[in-house]
Image: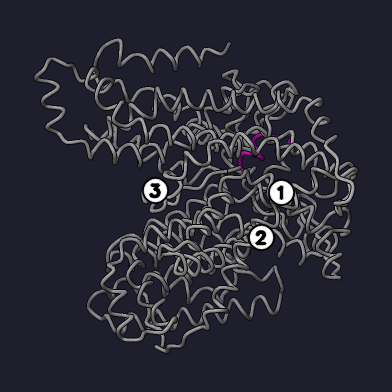
Amino acid sequence: MSVVIPIFFALGLLPFILRRKWPMALPVAFILSIATVAPIAWALYVSFTEYGVFQTAPVLVGLKNYEAVIRDSGFKLSLRLTALWSTLKTTLEISISFFIALRLRKETRRSKAALLLLGVGWFIPSFITVSGWRAFVQGYGGYSLLNTLLGTEIDVTLNAFHAFASSLLVSVWLSIPLSTMVILGMLGRVSRELDDVMKIDGTGDVATSNILFGEIRYLLIPYFLFQLARSMKEFTSVFLMTGNGPLLPEGFTPQTLTGSTTFLGIVLFRKFNTAKDYGLLSAYAVFVGIFAIIWILGALFSRSEVPRRHRQVLFLSSAAHVFLGLLTGWNWYIIPIVTGYAILPLIIPRFKKSFRRLVGILLMYEVMLSIFSVAQSGISGIIPASLLSVPLILFSLRYRLPQFDFSVPEWLKRVLVTVCLLPTAVVVLYILFLSFASDSSILPSLTMPTLSNYSRVLSDGLLSNIFNTIGVSFWAFVMVLLAGIPFSYLLATKRTPFVNGIAAVILFGSLYTGMHTLLPMYFVFERLGITDSLFGVGMVVCIQSLPLTILLLGSFFSSIPKELREVSLIEGLSEIGYFLRIVIPLSLPVIGGLLTYVLVSSFNSFSMPLILLNSQELMPFSLKIYGYVGEVRSFYTSWNLFGAASIIGILPLLLFFRSSLKLIYSSNLRDQGIEYD
């Protein structure tokens, strides 16, 4: 057994042994140092070394690895594709979610049913629904139910556009449930009196949307940018739906073969599987981490007040063009943009009108330059920095658009909402039909259903895989109970610089972590002896659940009247006694919802066990499902077994679904928009 486990338990029990409150921060600090801080530090150090598979110690080589990354034209192409894909995905996701939220904000039977359907879509693990979509859209080499019904010839293995569009639409569909709930939480803060005023004035749909957007823009714009930063790290949905995608003509490079969906996370995963030099692999991870930080800073700066916000986003846009230009290619057409964004903040606030006009001119120039570059060079002409700077600056200055108003017919709005929500029911029913198919056909016959698939997957050890996932949940539960809950109480009652620093690392880690941190995490865990263990995966699930834990429980603990604490102390209860006997019983409903969320996160985990686990005996439910479907070009896909295994695995989650509805629709969750793997 690794020494990490007894150390964690010792730190977790220390506050109750010493009967002091200050050690409550130690368990969280311990697991953060292992799963967040150490991997980042390890990657930074090793990226300056040569550290091969057969070397016992790294050897310093300076910037050699970074020079190799900069020369990798396939990696540059992947960055361009990732920036384009994430921008399109986030724009579609927020636009559709905003439209659905506007339709569902009034409580009716229809809206409650739609919310329930959204909750089911969020609750079912993404690796199941994405694989279901792959069966429906792609099937076997393009022979699929979708192509059969519509007479189309969609093939994500041969057509680059089909692969890109399919991965985009499926990822958008996966993100809509949570984003809709987030926006519903924002709209819940809008005064109902405003609705009455708009109704009296006869405001149309477009004007209503503009007014409501104006009411929540200070929340919605940062959320859009945070989602944009998160989508840069997308892995699971793309990996399962299309893999690398068809190879692009310009993607055939010596260092990295780049297909239409070979985004940054997939590039790192492929290199991890073939890496002979961990130093070079770490350099790639550091570069991807820097890209993530640029987009995260954009989201954080959007929350600042004017004129500080304008200065921050313009300086960041200028720096992004310089840094990304050095990597992806530089030309003199960018110089006016870089110079202008660096100089214009100096004239705020003395020349407000001139400032806004000059920034608007630069934005139009940047947009025209991007269009010309793409028209001339195709995908290789994408300017990644522009896909950050243009929306960031537009949202920062918030130019007013021309006012016009019209209303969409009610029947059309109902049709559009149905089109957005119906795919959830379609894919779940399709997976159910696959589970009764007599063979592995993607066109299951309803005339001869069979239950043999269920017995086959059960005899294949599926229950053992589900119990492994429950084992991951158990360890995550224990860590949340011993680390997350006590720290949330400490954060709510004693905000010291140390406690605030840990909270900042937790929230930053939820935005920053991705495939670029999972890879160095593997090497840190390997040295600590927790790679091939359910405890290691549970630790990562706990880390991912900590932001929600401190946000929900921290708010709840802060709402408990201070008088109750004072009375308890007068009655002779210690601080720890008050926490155990008063606070914990009062917060049991919230803790129960949190633990349900941890269970769902454990079932949803795919990339973590894919990286950290090697033993067949420890294979969780997600990797078992992956074993039935394989990658997109797999010739051994068993769609009928996939369907049966998915239905069996979904059943435990559905048992908890009803009890977690309060958490799903919690305004705290919706307002923060936490999203996990």
Q: Residue at x 85, y 34 (%)?
A: 452
Q: Magenta: predominant secondary structure element?
A: helix
Q: SS of the residue at dot 1?
A: helix
Q: Residue furthest left?
A: 570
- Residue linked to disc 2: 423
- Residue linked to disc 1: 239
What's the residue type where badge 2 is placed? Answer: Pro
On screen, residue 302 versus residue 66, left or right, reads: left
- Residue linked to disc 3: 666
Pinpoint residue 442: horizontal percent, then vertical percent. 85, 52
Q: SS of the residue at dot 3?
A: loop
On screen, residue 157 versus residue 535, left or right, reads: right
Quarter occupied by the N terminus: top right
Pinpoint residue 330: horizontal percent, then vertical percent. 60, 67
415 is within the stretch colored magenta: no
Mark found first going from the N terminus, 3 or 2: 2
